[in-house]
Amino acid sequence: MLKKVLLGLAAAIVVVAISGAAFAMFQVSAFDASLEKVYDVASPDIHASSDPAVIDRGKHIVESLGACNECHGADLGGKSGEDIGPIGQIHGSNLTSGKGGVAGRYTDGQLARVIRHGIKASGKSLRFMPAQGISWFPDDDLVAVVSYVRSLPPVDRTLDDGRIGVLGKVLDRLDMIPLDIARRIDHSAPAAKTLPAEATAEYGAKLARGCTGCHGEHFSGGPIPGAPSDLPVPANITPHETGIATATEADWNRLLDTGIRPNGKPLNPFMPIQMLRAMNPTERAALWAFLRSLPPKPFGER
């Protein structure tokens, strides 16, 4: 009798294992096919400017709202990505006009399309770069970013594409980690209108789109699905008792300036503190207004 039970249990385990493997392979195949898709999306009619004010605006966006230096390096000449185990390792491209750089191969319009649509010059999707969080940039901001990128000193640095593991591909298809970017953007949506840069929750909602990759679409944090155990767990940034319910705007600005939480503990280096520190007073106030306007969510509901 015991032998029959054990045999039945073993058979069940085999069936589950086979079913799980089949499911994973189906998701991997769907991911690979999606990355090979060529999108018929025209490049925006964007042209770089030599106006110093426009270039300065682009520099500010790159260093703050776009957080480009976090992945592409201080000189935007490319940077090796963190190895996150079975999820993969993706490197930040060289954005300059130097050898191996994107700016030397892309037109102004193609650079703008990367930001707005998450589509490379080949017409295929970007991998990992969170264009879905900055696709709201209006035309004047796209012009500013492209102008700044064109102004950069060329850096000769070539990085390979890195890798995306089976787990990364499965998690992407389950919408748990965004790695295939273009499929997450509505390419038929009209170009964003310029939203006044004011200290409002409405403007802050745009800025906060870049926070969802780590803190989740509900901003309540919790472990990132599939991430290695040593990866920091994003905090709850909603006005819940497990989040920022007791924090003040002074605490918020102190955090951005120093990287120190209200409880005296420093932020983990995984948090893009340099990008947050580079935000101007209006952007800081707008983001704070948005976070305070969120419905309170318990920690971990992402």
Image (cartoon, helix red, strand yellow):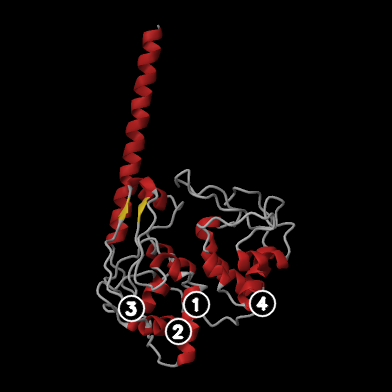
Q: Residue at x 32, y 58 (%)?
A: 34
Q: Amino acid at mark 3?
A: Gln
Q: Earlier in the sequence, mark 1 or mark 2?
A: 1
Helix, strand or loop at label 3? It is helix
Write down the residue under mark 4: 199
Q: Are marks 1 and 2 in contact (CB under 8 Å)?
A: yes
The amino acid pointed to by label 1 is: Ile
* Mark 3 crowdedness (10 Å alpha carbons): few <14, some 14-19, many ≥20: many
Q: Earlier in the sequence, mark 2 or mark 3?
A: 3
Whole-angstrom CA distance, mark 4 to mark 1, is: 17 Å
Q: In 3D space, how far apart are the residues under numbered discs 4 and 2 (Cα atoms)?
A: 21 Å
Q: Distance between the Cα atoms at labels 1 and 3?
A: 18 Å
In the picture, the disc for residue 144 is: 2
**22 and 269: which is toward the camera:** 269
User: Mark 3 or 4 closer to N-term?
Assistant: 3
Relative height, residue 27 to residue 260 (above, below):
above
Closer to the chain start, of discs 4 and 1, is 1
Foreground of the two, 294 or 145: 145
Q: Mark 3 = which residue?
A: 110
Above or below, comparing residue 291 to residue 31 in the picture = below
